[in-house]
């Protein structure tokens, strides 16, 4: 069975992507900052397609732990889809370096 | 943003709020003075519009559980019927009651207590809802069913979202042997034959008739009646038997622009009706569920054919004993007015179930008209006919009825108001329709 890792899995886009993958028979790993929030999505994927689906914690800004995150996955996924993103507030970003930096690092 | 129902009349500037989860939903309910939930915007008039706050919960579209032993499906309110069908029909389960479009939400189907071509035998959608979770104006969530909070359960099924937010529901799905319908087509020459055909088709699961709204005199009420059964596997042609639950998405055509007013008039509709009637060949056919139940879904944004002003759906039901007389009067007035109704659908309903739910035993006729002053005048005349015959108008289609007809038509109105008041004393759940009708 092929597997996909979806980064930023709490978004609406990620939900649609995960559904397309389980429909095609893939197993799915949903990664988001707060994996607790994904419980209902995991149930949904299982009801839809008896999918193998699990959620894991992942913070795109926490680069220091990305290596450990990959090691924790066990077998590496066949595909990774990244839908992490943050728009910030343009007006704020124009004046505050920290805000602009956060947007750039997130995306 | 500017919102309207599917009829695109009326339109109003509404603040749209999209809570992401139940916590945000509760916060919205507690902070807003008045709200209404909007499903997928398929009711025709103004029931899913509130200028202060129109809540969209389309993102609450997850399945919660399915038990193949008994067909019980639990899902969140924002799930689309299309999603339910495409997920469960391949496993042999169909929705027990379906409206004429699959682009409706689960919550919307309950709030409007939709009916289908099988109402005479199966009842309305709400009859197949085992239980639901309702968030009240104060943020509490109550489970409602025949055994818990019964009154609220009855008021919510058909309650147009005015009792609270339907967060999720458990529905009893229908086991089928294929995704196809065995359809039989019957043509009739007048209203008497049409009603006779309905009576003789009572044992069929699905019946519906397309009426030629421009036929007058001796031809008044002539129709093409379609009756159907879920096809058994052994009834399928050999080339379909290998894959009895095939679910294919038809190529959807989109109406590219708002038609100018002159495109639909009594001559073009008359021509269409003549061709349609002539093309309907009597006999039996095996048709796929999508063409049978959702022919208009194949034309995206078909509501634009009525042009910029939008259109009015008029769906009434008349008690069985008064149907013959009342239908004759309505059809005569429509034909005489020269305002052509492009879609005219007749259906025999079974007994209804209380409060604000639409169906009652008798005939229901659905017509649509361009939203013009002439149409509004005609519909006011039709209201008088409906009222005189003890009938009522479908709230999910309504954009303009008055309070008198509502009160006369819905015997359960007081029971509804008292159940609603108990659940929402401050009247937080409110739509343009509920304001108009003093609901």
Image: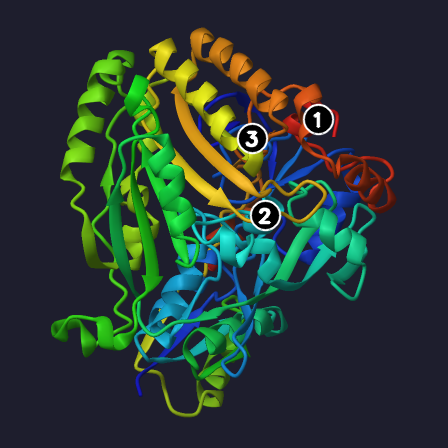
Task: Indicate which disc residue B322 carries.
Answer: 3
Residue toward you, B230 or B245: B230
What is the x, y in percent for residue B187? 24, 40
Q: Residue at x 53, y 64 (%)?
A: B62
Residue under numbered circle 1: B408
Q: Residues within 10 Å of mark 2 (few under 14, many from 20)?
A: many
Horizontal arrangement in the rendering, residue B179 relative to residue B98 (left or right): left
Count neighbours of disc 1 (C-alpha within 10 A) and say few if under 14, some if 14 to 19, many if 20 or more: some
Crowdedness of circle 3 by 10 Å Cα count: few (<14), some, many (20+)?
A: some
Q: Residue furthest left?
A: B239
Badge 1 sits on which subunit?
B
Q: Earlier in the sequence, mark 2 or mark 3?
A: 2
> Quick check: can you spot residue B216?
no
Do marks 2 and 3 both belong to one polypeptide chain?
yes
Disc 1 and disc 2 in contact, CB within 8 angstroms: no
Residue of label 2: B113
Q: Chain of mark 3?
A: B
């Amino acid at each position: 069975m092929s597997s996909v890792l979806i980064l930023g899995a709490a978004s609406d886009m990620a939900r649609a992507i995960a559904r397309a993958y389980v429909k095609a028979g893939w197993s799915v790993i949903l990664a988001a900052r707060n994996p607790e929030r994904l419980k209902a999505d995991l149930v949904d994927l299982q009801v839809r397609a008896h999918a193998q689906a699990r959620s894991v914690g992942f913070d795109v800004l926490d680069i220091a732990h990305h290596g450990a995150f990959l090691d924790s996955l066990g077998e590496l996924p066949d595909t990774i889809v990244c839908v992490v993103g943050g728009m910030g507030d343009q007006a704020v970003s124009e004046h505050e370096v920290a805000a602009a930096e956060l947007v750039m690092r997130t995306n | 943003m500017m919102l309207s129902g599917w009829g695109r009349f009326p339109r109003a500037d509404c603040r749209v709020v999209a809570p992401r989860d139940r916590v945000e939903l509760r916060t919205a309910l507690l902070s807003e003075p008045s709200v209404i939930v909007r499903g997928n915007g398929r009711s025709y008039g103004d029931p899913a519009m509130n200028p202060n706050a129109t809540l969209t919960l389309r993102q609450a579209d997850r399945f919660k559980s399915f038990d193949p032993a008994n067909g019980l499906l639990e899902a969140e309110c924002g799930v689309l019927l299309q999603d339910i069908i495409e997920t469960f029909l391949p496993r042999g389960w169909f929705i027990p009651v379906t409206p004429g479009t699959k682009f409706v939400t689960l919550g919307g189907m309950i709030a409007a207590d939709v009916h289908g071509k099988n109402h005479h035998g199966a009842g309305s959608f709400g009859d197949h809802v085992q239980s639901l979770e309702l968030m009240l104006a104060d943020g509490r969530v109550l489970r409602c069913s025949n055994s818990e909070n019964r009154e609220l359960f009855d008021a919510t099924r058909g309650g147009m979202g005015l009792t609270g937010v339907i967060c999720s529901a458990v529905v009893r799905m229908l086991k089928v042997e294929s995704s196809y319908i065995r359809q039989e087509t019957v043509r009739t020459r007048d209203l008497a034959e049409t009603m006779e055909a309905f009576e003789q088709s009572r044992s069929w699961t699905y019946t519906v008739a397309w009426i030629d709204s421009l036929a007058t005199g001796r031809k008044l009420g002539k129709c093409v009646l379609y009756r159907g059964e879920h096809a058994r596997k052994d009834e399928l042609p050999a080339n379909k038997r290998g894959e009895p639950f095939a679910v294919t998405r038809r190529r959807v055509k989109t109406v590219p622009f708002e038609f100018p007013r002159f495109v639909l008039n009594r001559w073009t509709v008359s021509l269409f009706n003549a061709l349609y009637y002539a093309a309907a060949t009597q006999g039996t056919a095996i048709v796929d569920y999508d063409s049978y139940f959702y022919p208009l879904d194949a034309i995206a944004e078909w509501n634009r054919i009525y042009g910029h002003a939008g259109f009015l759906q008029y769906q009434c039901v008349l008690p069985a004993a008064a149907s013959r007389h009342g239908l004759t009067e309505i059809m005569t007035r429509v034909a005489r007015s020269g305002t052509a109704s492009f879609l005219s659908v007749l259906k025999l309903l079974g007994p209804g179930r209380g409060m604000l739910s639409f169906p009652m035993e008798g005939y229901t006729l659905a017509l649509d008209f361009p939203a013009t002053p002439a149409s509004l005048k005609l519909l006011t005349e039709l209201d008088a006919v409906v009222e005189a015959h003890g009938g009522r108008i479908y709230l999910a289609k309504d954009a303009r009825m008055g309070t008198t007809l509502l009160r006369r038509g819905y015997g359960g109105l007081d029971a509804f108001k008292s159940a609603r008041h108990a659940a929402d004393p401050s009247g937080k759940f409110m739509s343009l329709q509920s304001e108009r009708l003093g609901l």
